[in-house]
Image (spheres, helix red, strand yellow):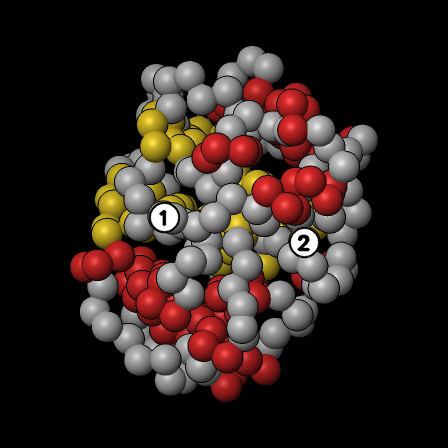
Amino acid sequence: MCRLLGSASPAPATLETVLGSGQRQVFTDMAQLHRDGWGTAWRDGAGRVQRHVRATTATGDARLEHTLAEEASTARIVHLRLATMGLACSTENTHPFVADGMAFAHNGSLEPAGPIERLIGQEQLASLEGTTDSERYFAAVRTLVARGASVFDALVDTVAALRRAYPHRSLNALLLSGTELFAVHASQDVPIPHGVFAASGIPVERLPRHHVDAYYLMRTRRGEDGSILFASSGLDITGWDPLPAETVTRVDLATLALETVPLDAAAPRALVA
C-alpha cells in the first residue's frame, strides 16, 4: 500500500511547479504513514530513464524535498512505500523498479505469488532482485515486451490477466519509459486497509485526505501548459478528475496526447509463462 505521483510536461519542470503551491508539503507529509522507503524515476535530457531510491523513511529526507522542488524533468514518477507485512524494507524492494529502459511503481498487494509468477518468462524471473509482488508484476509486463509486444499492449494484457487472478487486489501503478508514461487505475471494489492504518498509530483524523473513503482512487489533472499529473489519494484534489476505473492510460511524452483503454478490451492471456 503506497502513494503514487507521476507527471509529464512539455518542457523540463519540477514536480512542485507542476503540482502547484502547497502540494509538495502535503505529499511529503504522507511519508509519516507511508514510511517504508521512497523512490523516484525520471526521464533525463537524453530520454533515458534514471532512478534514485532509499529504503528508509522519506520523512525529514532532504533528498525528497530536493527531488520535488529542484529536479526538473519532462517526466517523473515518485513512490512512497507502505510495505506489505512480511516484505523487507531494503533497496531491492524499494520502488520504482528499473529494467529494460523502464521504471515501474505499484500500489497494492498481490497474494499468493503463484498466479503472477506463471506470467513471467525465465529470463525475467532470473533477473529479479527483490522479494516483492510488485517487481514480479513489472517482470510480467517485461516478459510480453521481450516477446515483441508494445509496452502499452503488454501493460494492458498483463493487468487484465492479473485482474482475473486477483479480483480483489489493487493493481494501481505507474510505468515510465523514455517515450511514454502510463497510469493503471485498477482497484475497483478493493477494500480499504483500515487495519493497516490503525496499526500505524496515526489517529484517523490525522490520516491524509481521502484515505478512509477513497484510498485507491487515482486522479488526473491537465495543466494550462498541457502538463499531465497522476496521483493516488492524499493531495488537494480541487480541479482534478478521477481516472476511469479498470483502465490503463498512456501519455505520449512527445505530444502529451492521452489514450485510455479499458481492461475488458484486452485479449485473454493464459497464466502460463
Does dot 1 land on a helix, a strand or a loop?
loop
In the image, residue 116 above or below residue 28: below
Residue at screen point 73% across, 44% down:
199
Asked if residue 252 shows in the view, the reply is: no
Does dot 2 land on a helix, a strand or a loop?
loop
Residue at screen point 74% across, 41% down:
200
Q: Which mark is residue 188?
A: 1
Answer with left or right where residue 271 lies relative to residue 136: left
Answer with left or right where residue 3 lies relative to residue 64: left
Asked if residue 25 shows in the view, the reply is: yes
In the image, residue 6 above or below residue 248: above
Disc 2/disc 1 C-alpha distance (Å): 21 Å
Q: Which residue is mark 2?
A: 83
Query: Badge 1: few (under 14), some or many (20 or more) residues near its Cα, within 10 Å?
Result: some
Q: Earlier in the sequence, mark 2 or mark 1?
A: 2
Residue at screen point 65% across, 46% down:
196
> Residue 237 occupies which quadrant of the picture?
top left
The spot of residue 243 in percent (x, y) is: 33, 37
Q: Between residues 73 and 263, which one lies in front from this camera angle?
A: 263
